[in-house]
Amino acid sequence: MTSSGSSVNQTAGLPRRPAPGQLNNESTEGQDQNNAMRVLIIEDDRETAQFLQKSLKENGHTADLATDGEAGLSLAVDGTYDVLIVDRMLPRLDGLSVIKSLRAQGNRTPVLILSALGEVDDRVKGLRAGGDDYLTKPYAYSELLARVEALGRRTAPEEQQTRYTVGDLILDRLSHRVTRSGEHILLQPREYRLLEYLMQHAGQVVTRTMLLEHVWDYHFDPQTNVIDVHVSRLRAKIDKNFDKPLLHTVRGAGYTIRDGPG
Amino acid sequence: MTALVERVAKAASTTAFGLSAAAVAFFLFAAAIVVGFLFWQTNNLLTHQVLGVLTAEARILSSEMKVGGQAKLAETVGAMSRLQGAGLYYLADDSGAKIAGNLNRIPPELTDDPHGGVFSYQPAGDSTGASHLAVAIPVDLGPDNRLIVGRDIEDQRAFADSIRLAFLLGFGVLSVLGLLGGLAVSRLILNRMDAITATSRSIMEGDLAQRIPTSGRGGELDALAQNLNQMLDRIEGLMNGLREVSDNIAHDLKTPLNRLRNAAEAALRDPRGAEAYREGLERTIEKSDELIKTFNALLLIARLEAGPLEESVETFDLGSFVEDVAELYTPATEEAGFALSIEAEKDVFVRANRQLIGQAVANLIDNAIKYSRGGEPGSTITVRAYRDAGRPAISVGDHGPGISAGDRERALKRFVRLEASRTQPGTGLGLSLVAAVARLHHGEVRLTDNHPGLKVIVLLSAKCLIAPADTGPSDVRAGIAAQ
């Protein structure tokens, strides 16, 4: 689905290969050029669709447009896309039906559902229909981009990745051991999950909402910024006594962990 | 007069009248079958009796013939004919000439019939001249004599006629009374229906406060009226909710929208140019995010009040879930200078909407942190999950300024921000969302004194609680442990 360089498939016994974080050493700031993706946007509102297409292009991806469900479905079946962005309410064939018929044909392309319906039930219905992620309108573009990139980079099943490496930071998923420069770092269970998710998406921007959804499994608004404090506690443990910071704050978007310029 | 005709015509066109007319018709049909059968049976029985008598007489007369020959027979027939009675006789020789009997001739109805039958004749003694009905059978006396014995059955016919008349009259009276009764019943129902129609018409015209009058005697029409009234209560409640929401949108969204617009205009006019534009745009995004938050909370409350969300109900351990959510807030609470104490009872398994319960707990802790600032520094916020008399309960207590007893009811309403809290950031929807979540789980929210401060208790319905045996081990964090 993605270029071979983005693979994070590393097993403990294999010799070390470049991890995503290290690959980003060569990339220009703020962009993941090694991960150019083909995205299909199925959205009936032309203004929104064109805004998305233009913005995704600026971030180094290519995007095709379909303005109704039927056209979208035939494009999605024929073309090879890394991610589909599907609006829930579409003319001719609604978004959930598009996803259902794709899944029925064995097409596993990751799908991000966009919807004006943000209720708890609608989210559950969307994911049940075969969607991989759900984003409620109105959304921040940075949130959408982070989610699209996270979906596009979902490669091998998580179980196969037993070890994440970013720079000299190593997280071993078998022994639940975290070391930096060979030094053992003691983490709380939640801090471990947080670091695991960040490293799983090394080099990518991860938003606060994504952390809340994946690390805590909470799909509600926490009212205040509770995530920042958790991240800064984690940062204190993994970055404080080392020269080079790995965990970076991306202004207006979220966080990223990478071995490179922040 | 025309008004009366109109009313009767209206009543006659009702379903109730149609039904009672059908019932009357069916009853008459059934009665006709029963009466007809009875009549036929009685007639049969009487005919049978007459035939029995005739057969016996025929036997006697033929034995007379055997004993005394034609002369003796003629004498006996002559004697019997002279008796005042219902017996009819006619005896003739082989040439057809009459020998004895009170009939003048063989009735034309019976000339060709070897088995006898019914005929009519003119009795000699009847001065009215009306013909009577009779039954006769031929008696076999050999080829030399022809004898017919009969009986007058005029009485039987009169009996049958009177029965027929009685039944026809009876049926007539029954149908008229039945139809009148039907009209009366439909008129009664029509009056009640007219009341319901009139009420619903004025409701359609917009007067939602109208209710259908009930007679108070019970019965199905009252039950119907009560159900309709309850439905109207619910509709009125929903309409009021909707009106409230739109009023609130007008009040509390237009103001920040206007501020947003003002900020954008001010940025455009700012002589600093590009830098000011950037700041202005950033502020615009920030403000619109706040607006979206308020809008989402409003929509969620409205959605929760409209009915249950079935898709996302899950079974989970309330204690460890509340502990989990509270832990999310622990660093933020400590950062704000307060302590967070969590007391979660184990094995309180509930079937509920996990995300919404999480939202409620989050709102309560967020509020507690905000309002603790108005109290003693370094105070403790206590989050509890427990069982209260068989009901799952969550409580969050702070040691802030609290809410006076008089204001507690009002604090649960939408957008109400008590004077003391005006300076705090927020949508003013936090607590009303908590109340909506509690109502969705058939529970309620109680505000109590925390000596000092406020303690909010969310009580879910006992139905949400399930026995620990119903669930498997559900430690979500099993297998995740750092060293």
Image (cartoon, rainbow, N blue to C red):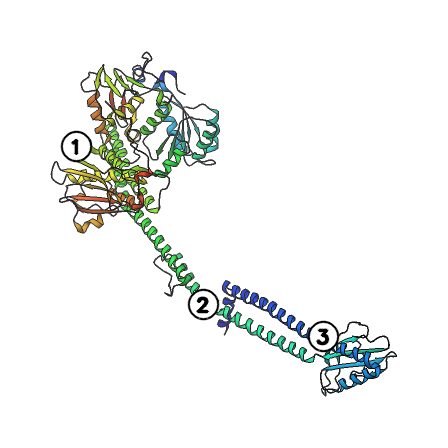
Select label 1 or label 3 by which is in front: 3
**Residue A68 appears anywhere in the view:** no
Name the one closer to the observer, A75 or B303: B303
Question: Which residue sits at x=41%, y=59%?
Answer: B224
Q: Residues within 10 Å of mark 2 (few under 14, many from 20)?
A: some
Amino acid of disc 2: Leu
Residue that mark 1 sits on: B334
Name the one closer to the observer, B132 or B178: B132
Q: Secondary structure at mark 3?
A: helix
Residue B58, quarter of picture: bottom right
Residue B70, quarter of picture: bottom right
Report in which chain the residue with disc 2 lies. B
Q: Residues within 10 Å of mark 3 (few under 14, many from 20)?
A: some
Q: What is the spatial separation of the Cα atoms under label 1 and label 3, in whole angstroms? A: 119 Å
Q: What is the spatial separation of the Cα atoms under label 2 and label 3, in whole angstroms? A: 58 Å
Q: Secondary structure at mark 2?
A: helix
Amino acid of disc 1: Glu
Residue that mark 2 sits on: B188
Q: Are marks 1 and 3 in contact (CB under 8 Å)?
A: no
**Most distant residue in the front direction:** B67
Q: Secondary structure at mark 1?
A: helix
Name the one closer to the observer, B369 or B90: B90
Residue B273, quarter of picture: top left
Amino acid of disc 3: Leu
Q: Is residue B300 left or right of residue B31?
A: left
Q: Is residue B477 left or right of residue B132?
A: left
Report in which chain the residue with disc 1 lies. B
Residue that mark 3 sits on: B51
